[in-house]
Amino acid sequence: MAPLLANASAPRALIDALRAEIDAHNFRYYVLDAPSISDAAFDQLLRELHAIEAAHPEWITADSPTQRVGSPTYTTSFAPVTHAMPMLSLDNAFSEAEWDAFAARAQERLGQSTPLVFAAEPKFDGLAINLTYREGLLVQAATRGDGQTGEDVTLNVRSIANIPQALQSARANLIEVRGEVVLTHAAFAALNTAAQAAGEKKFVNPRNAAAGSLRQKDPRITAQRQLQFFAYGLGAVAGIPQPDSQLALLDWLAAQGFTVSPHRQRCDDRAAVLAYYHAMQARRSTLDYDIDGVVFKVNARAEQEALGFVARAPRWAIAYKFPAEEAVSQVQSVDFQVGRTGALTPVARITPVFVGGVTVANITLHNMDEITRKNIHIGDFVTVRRAGDVIPEIVAVLPERRPPNATIISLPETCPVCGSQVLRVENEAIARCSGGLFCPAQRREAIKHFASRKALNIDGLGDKWVELLLEHRLIAHVDDLFTLTVPQLLTLPRMGEKSAQNLVEAIEAAKNTTLPRFLYALGVREVGEVTASALASHFAALDPLLNASLDDLQTVPDVGPIVAQHVHTFLRQPHNIEVMNNLIDAGVHWPPPAPKAATLPLTGHTYVLTGTLSTLTREEAAARLQALGAKTSSSVSAKTTAVIAGEAAGSKLAKAQTLGVPVLDEAGLLNLLESPPA
Ligand code: IVH
């Protein structure tokens, strides 16, 4: 673990600084509802303090943050409420081993051989409240506070829509219902949008927003916040028997009008417990409220009672937490990676840290603007976030922990790979190596791109292969791929006949491609899949595209002056022309342009045939007109293009004359069929 303060001289000074820092965070969290660091970062500070106190027990004081549960009691304007039954905390497990230890302890303590059954529920990341019902009516609501004494938030809680003012049927003398108040992601987003519009401070996360909402002076404001309550337990109860298991209790709460988790589940064995944990972890990002783990409770009430409590947590329940999505680490150095288009991307190398279930050591910083905006220095302690499968990011620097020797990150003047000058267009976030295909990094990335799935899709030619082929100088440019042979590939280390054969076959198969893929594969700047398709369908073939002027290019949908310039420049560089020719000579091909589904010469025209023709039947005449796109009809109207009148034409000819529809004789028809209008 990195030291808290790089310049702390003595552990004694460190412990005081640490306690002061933790107290300050507690105050921001509990009173201001505006924490400045993540829970994980806070926990880490607390663990550091624990570690020092473990080494120096003589320094432990009663007011140390390690000696308190939950929030310290700060003076506020809400009346204190002493809980009839303390509101307890839960022990945490962070691994299967810790779960096993918990289950084994409980099993052993009960001293029975039948395996325990557990009730599983999400661990809501909101704030715990206690609701007091007397004779079935809600009379008081209180926050957890320090577990013994909370705050009276009755008025505000009455405004939460899914909290019943009266129980459905239970009319006992006293029933305390406990659960968690949460704010949905949708409501949280709306709240922050409104706060921003009003120029107010935004909330850091839904839980703090929920806490802030519950502690509003004006219950009408709380009502607008759309808080939700999930019930999961009972406090003090007098006058009715309690359900005999946790799952029965949840059903009972639902029957009394409470929302309970639809994800509650009975787990009969270890496999079911672990499956539930993983299933909820996978479901986490789809829920509209935050959860930070799952809670397993021994299901049977009799067994819960037999197990009892230790200090501040029951022995019959445990919170199996998801891996923290945020952690604190230190920036060791920053490297610049060169991409396909020469863009330099700063990548922070951090002290490896376990976050979101994986160890993270490298984090992209995207560009220099991001570094400036986040004010990141080498040596800084930073909050690292990795949620779900999202790529890890540095959320923020912890300014109070910046070591005195922290250094500014600056953009290199020359490319770290090829030494060419680095250029940064004014007002553009991105800096680029000016080396083009001279730069080995750009060449390597260009080849990877060329072979990638949406480009030529050379099956099996992954990044590792490309690097190997370049390293052993079997290829230098994309066109070299098509001259690779099996014997050549067999010169590579650990290369088998079969793999070599497969690769050569995949390259052969990739020759049969499409124009959009080919254009995309070239890797022209700003030409992604969509633009490549637009260019292909506009020009239909490569040659017209090669000859297109800047103006021609801009007539293509979505191609503006910048893209047009990139395409134009690329297609005129001798090197690029050579590569394209080599590719085509090697056999890369695509289907010729489909004949234009052009409209036929008589499309939109309608003819009526009448009378007897001498050189062809009426049916033949109709078929030949239709082949030219015309329609034929048996009745004349003002929309008829012309009536074709043979010998002995009758009423249709007369109608044409009255309507002023043109009339053609047989010679006119033959002339129309021979040379239809263009
Ligand atoms: S049961 C005696 N069930 O987690 C058992 N707690 O870290 C008391 N929490 O104080 C709690 N979801 O605020 C229980 N399904 C759940 C919960 C839950 C969230 C909170 C609760 C508790 C804290 C302990």
Image (cartoon, grey):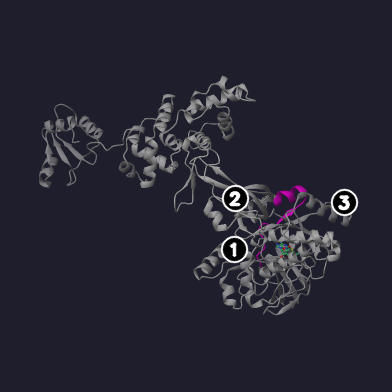
Question: Which is nearer the N-term, disc 2 or disc 3?
Answer: 3
Q: Position of residue 313 (x, y in %)?
A: 80, 64
Which of these two is toward me, 470 or 323? 470
Position of residue 250 relative to residue 104, above or below, is below
Label 1, label 3: how far apart the Cα atoms are: 43 Å
Label 2, label 3: how far apart the Cα atoms are: 44 Å
Instruction: Using residue 254 as the reference point, say whether residue 484 is left or right of it.
Output: left
Q: Quadrant of residue 490?
A: top right
Question: Which is nearer the N-term, disc 1 or disc 3?
Answer: 3
- Residue 261 lies within the magenta run: yes
Residue 560 showing in the rendered view: no
Q: Give the amino acid type for the residue marked by disc 2 in the picture.
A: Val
Mark 3 Cα shell of 10 Å, populated few (<14), some (14-19), many (≥20): few
Instruction: Using residue 271 as the reference point, say whether residue 36 is left or right of it.
Output: left
Position of residue 45 relative to residue 239, above or below, is above
Q: Which quadrant does the C terminus fall into?
A: top left
Residue 184 image label: 1
Residue 394 showing in the rendered view: yes
Mark 2 Cα shell of 10 Å, populated few (<14), some (14-19), many (≥20): few
Which residue in the protein does label 3 denote? 113
